[in-house]
Amino acid sequence: MTSSEKRRSLLEFLRTQCVLLIYDNLETLTKEGQEAIADFLRELPQGSKAIITSRRRGGEGAVWLRVGELDWGAAHGIIENEVLRDAGLANKLRKVERRWKELYDETRGSPLALVHILGLLRVRAALTFDGALAMLRGTHRKDNLVKFVYQEAHKELSSDDKNALCAVSIFATSATFEAWMNVADLSRSALETSIDRLSALSLIDVLEGVENYSIHPLTRTFVREDLLIDSKLVNTLENAYLTYWVNYVTKYSNSKKFDSYYLVEVEWNNIKLAIELLWRKIGLRRGKIKNEDFVRMFLATNEMLQDVLLLHGHWDERTFINKKAYSISLAADNMDVAGLNAYHVAWVNGVYGRNLPSKAKSWVDKCVKLWSKSDNDSNVAEAKRLRGLTAMQNGRLKDAERFLKDSLNIFREIEEEYSVMNVFNDLGRLSLSQERLSLAKRYFQSALDISYEVKSEEGQAFSKANLGDVAIKQQDIAEAQKIYKQALPLAQKVGRVDLIARIKCGLALVWEIKGRENKALPLAKDGLELYERLQHPNLREARSFVKRLMKKIESG
């Protein structure tokens, strides 16, 4: 989406929810970024709230709450906790326990400064309690506490610590131990030692409950300005980062491993950063490529991500990457792959995606142009299928049937059963739109039969959902309910979001017809939520459905 579309879509979503938005560390944004957030929050719909944290006061029309100093009781608890964690620190501090409040006074109630000075006492064997007090009294840290912490900690860093800190600063958000170890190229024991020191010095945060590590945005800036100044080091770390995430995607998103797809979602921010980094390193300018090795990595990663992004509803991200891959493939003179990526973009905007003919048309044309004269019969057939789907989208039903049948014949000749199954479903949807219910049912049943032969659980779920739609049209409510119930767990297993939404709305309709609106409403709401996420063409219909059910329940 364009920026204005994103803004409009987000506001539209927030009008249907009660959401708390939290914007942390506002001061790390540019002035323009801060102003953009302020403008957005002025339009925040009733029912949603926002909390902003910043080291500087600013903005209008908000309630500003100053976070004051720690009270002495809380500060004492922090010191006691750190002492219990480390015998060396305990040895230094237990004998001066009566003077602990002096540390509190000199840090002026700042938890960051307090934890940091305790960390220095841990890692500097020669630093005494009085020496720590002298350090605090002699520093001008008031205006930039994070910088003070970084500069003091920097003096204690080993080469492994610096390498680990540089590596974690590359990550988009947080890093797992395994990922961090690979990118930093450190042994497990070496990284464990560095983590202990970096954590003690308040340079990294260890996230509660998971083995994840993050770095404060301002600390990240200091690391990049101070340590990441050697272009060779930067290049080495970036290449290690890319290698790790390309291998990660290969492991968890390849070969329809549906049960591992969630692992790609968990690390999507880091994977997305790797893709953006690959794009930058490819250096495409005026149709010329700077580095062909990175082209191969980009295209391979893109291909492996197609299923997980499609099934889990990340349509915008998928389209963004496909458009990049299309440009790269053209520059690399790989017309079949360029056609494939044009096909993917057309799919999201076409009849099986968002049903936006104007946005789909140019990508359909690109794909058809590249594939119609291809030496690959499968591509030729897919181009005909795409033309058929586009004709269906535009209401040219005779043309749609002709193109789809031509596509079916080619796929049958080359014995691509999976594609034959898809085209049978296409022809069934076409027949359903024409109210040719018996024909639609035969096509969908043929697709279902093949889905069992090729062992496609996604194909089974899709074909069953289609048969459920036919049963609804034929007013065979018992049959519709039975088929939808069979389809839902299959769709949930493969994680195809648009199909799950469609089946849940189908089941909700069954319950409504039975006069059981209370059972229908939760299913309809689930479907609506998924359609909202996708900005699916069924969104308006789903909203009306939910309103209708709520009105019926309210009226008794």
Image: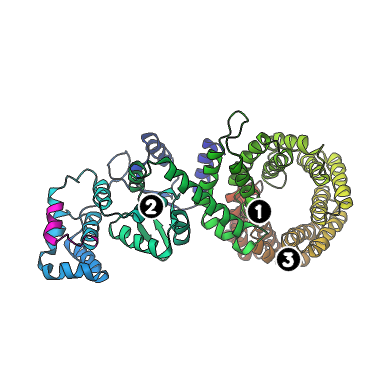
Q: Residues within 10 Å of mark 2 (few under 14, many from 20)?
A: many
Q: Quadrant of the C terminus?
A: bottom right
Give the secondary structure at mark 3: helix
Task: Give coordinates of residue 181: x percent, y percent.
Answer: 45, 59
**Foreground label between 3 and 1:** 1
- Disc nearer the start of the sequence (3/1): 1
Q: Main secondary structure of the magenta part?
A: helix
**Foreground label between 3 and 2:** 2
Residue at 28%, 60% in the rendered image: 200
Q: Which residue is mark 2?
A: 163
- Disc nearer the start of the sequence (2/1): 2
Q: Give, as a single range, the part of the protein colored magenta.
A: 123-135
Measure the C-alpha gap from mark 3 to mark 1.
28 Å
Q: Is residue 208 visible?
A: no
Counting the numbered discs, the total is 3
Task: Please check the rendered image and state whether residue 129 is part of the magenta-colored stretch, yes or no.
Answer: yes
Measure the C-alpha gap from mark 3 to mark 2.
59 Å
Q: Which residue is mark 3?
A: 481
CB atoms of marks 3 and 2 within 8 Å: no
Q: Which residue is mark 1?
A: 307
Residue at 78%, 66% in the rendered image: 479
